[in-house]
Image: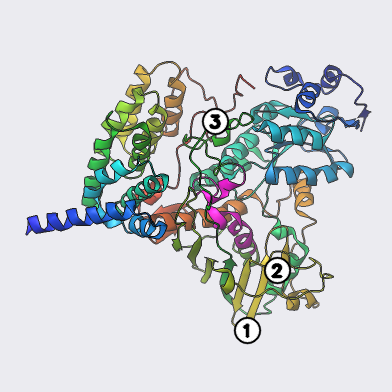
Amino acid sequence: MRIISDSLSDTEVSKQKGDKTMKKSNQLNRREFLAAAGATAVSMPYLIPSAVLAGRGRAGANERITTAHIGVGGRGGGLLREIKKFREAGVVNIAAVCDIDKSRLARAVEEAGPGTEPYHDYRYILERKDIDAVVIGTPDHWHGVQMVHAAECGKHIYIEKPACCTIEEGKAMVAAGRKNKVAVQVGSQGRSQPEAYLAHRYLVNGNIGHIDRVDCFHYPSPEDNNPVPDSDPPPELDWDMWLGPLRWRPYNKRYCHGTFRWLLESGGGQIRDRGAHVMSCAMWWMGADGTGPVTVEATGTPPTKGLWDSAVLMDVTYTFRNPDWVLTWRQMPNDQLPPAEERTGKEPGGKISRPGYGAIYRGDKGQFIHWGGDGGTWAEKKAREWKLPAGARDVYESPGHMEDWFKGIKTGAKTIMNIEAAVGVANLCVLGNLSYILGRKLQWDQAGQTIVGDEQAQRMMSRPQRHPYHL
Amino acid sequence: MAQMASTAQAQGVEELIAGIRDSSDKVRTEAWLNAGKAGAPAVKPLAKVMTDNDLEVARAAKRALWKIVRHTGRPGANKERRAVETELAALLGKDQPVSVRREVIWMLSEIGARNSIKPIAGLLRNKDLREDARMALERIPTKRAVTVLKSAFEKAPEDFKPNIAQSLRKRGEEVAGYPCQKLVPKEKS
């Protein structure tokens, strides 16, 4: 690995990187950008990407993976900070950051440090041959399109959950991942937590007997208590690109960064946010990846005012057959949530900092409860203290969610939250919302990946996308 | 008998509109949540309220109309669905504000069939609404929708042809001369 000093000019670095796309008119000159944004440059070494030293394809075992980050505010910013730790450990280079909000982009450039190029349009990143992998932290409505585009351009992908907003997007994502043979990790990182491993092996070894019901619980979605009229977007924001594939609508302060979560068309509410975590654990631990329900039935309570329209309280029942079991998702009043276990803080996952969601697994010999299910996953004491007897079944222990992805990139091994599994989980969330919106029970054909006997619901399995932001 | 039913229906619509216009959040929410069964007779009165100056009242009217669309789209309700479709299609004319027409286009994308295609196709010439109209036609699963898109493609201005080409490819048609633009970055930074 060669190290190039930041004292080289941008042009020299660009030449050494062998990157002809660097001179595109759209590309922002890093120093000019930082100066304009008022950011302070810090001198740091730049490491030549693996694809420049070796040929395109899988990075060698000892080569750095060159990443680019698409969407760097909110959760995307968190992912950037996480990846930085792997750069310090010699695992990755961070070559580019991209955001359609100039303020967020400026912060990300400063965060990432020298050697990282800023972009406004992610498609310039996909054109760069020196980038091995992309980390996508955009709002949900961009996930399907950007994942498919990145796969078609041969990039390995880490993408935030939920995988998709529609059944059609999910199908396209699975197809693109398979066809282009890229390693995809979806950000339902609960599967990779230390206590998730303990819970998993506890359950699959029959400690609570045959499990025929999993009840997920979550506190309510918020209501918009400060609704405002539509207005012009702020100057730093490219509203057209923020909307991307969604139908056009005027900007509203209550429908953008962060708050998009509470609108059904974009964020899908708690069920598509935390459901993609808690139900991910359920599908993994129940050995149900690759399967799906036969019926989905949802009811809920909408907000009484404001722009947000995702259910405040919600009850969804998924019925599975062969094997028969029931999965439920319930957003309930806070006073109905199960109490969190008291802990010392010395447990593998430390103290429970998110007691407001999790799931209860009901078997014929007892029950088991976990809290969280995302970056924090906490298993009940009996699972943590259980020792694996000789001859008992062990399960895969993830080295960490990012590490598992890097392993997938370098070896071709299937990732723990691969795109097939992630779409299966996201489909649960999507179908739950569809049943809620339509006010009726849906029949689902898992093999055909389609809703049965309901033409309107079938049309809603896809959502036409604005030109040119489409799958 | 028919007259009595019609009077009862009219009273039901009046009550619905009164609920939608109520100053209480709870009353408005209750009204739109129960709007589904009001059906076709409530479509035009609700559309009028969708542009009310009070944002919450306007929003409640829009949600009530969507409830009607979702209710009448249920399996086995074809007659109701067609009646609502006819009322919605009548709202696509120039006498309605763009915001109402845009919402109605998307409603028809879920339940529209033969009767909606011509009025939606007419909006492919409207600069404000043509993209929504294109997407709705892409979603309506009839051959007639594809035929209309093909015809519109021939007559469309150059700046809109790639959009229609996208819909035609989505519906399994081959389109020459207008390659897919999805991976082409924007000119402007």
At label 3, which amino acid type do we have?
A: Asp
* Mark 2 neighbour class, 10 Å CA radius: few under 14, some 14 to 19, many 20 or more: many
Looking at the image, residue A195 lies above or below residue A51: below
- Which of these two is toward me, A101 or B85? A101
Say which quarter of the image contains residue B132.
Answer: top left
Q: What quarter of the picture does the C terminus of chain B occupy?
A: top right
Say which quarter of the image contains residue A209.
Answer: bottom right
Most frequent secondary structure within the magenta stretch:
helix
Q: Which residue is mark 1?
A: A365
Whether residue A470 is visible: yes
The span from disc 1 to disc 3 (Cα, nearest Å) is 55 Å
Which numbered disc covers residue A200? 2
Labels 1 and 3 touching (C-beta < 8 A)? no
User: What residue sits 23% from the left and 51% below the top?
Assistant: B80
Q: Which SS class for mark 1?
A: loop
Q: Chain of mark 1?
A: A
Residue B177 placement (x, y as % from top left) = 47, 17
Residue A12 placement (x, y as % from top left) = 86, 18
Say which quarter of the image contains residue A388.
Answer: bottom right
- Which of these two is toward me, B126 or A204? B126
Looking at the image, residue A463 lies above or below residue A238: below
Q: Provide the residue span drawn in magenta.
A: A257-281
Is B26 placed left or right of A80 in the picture? left
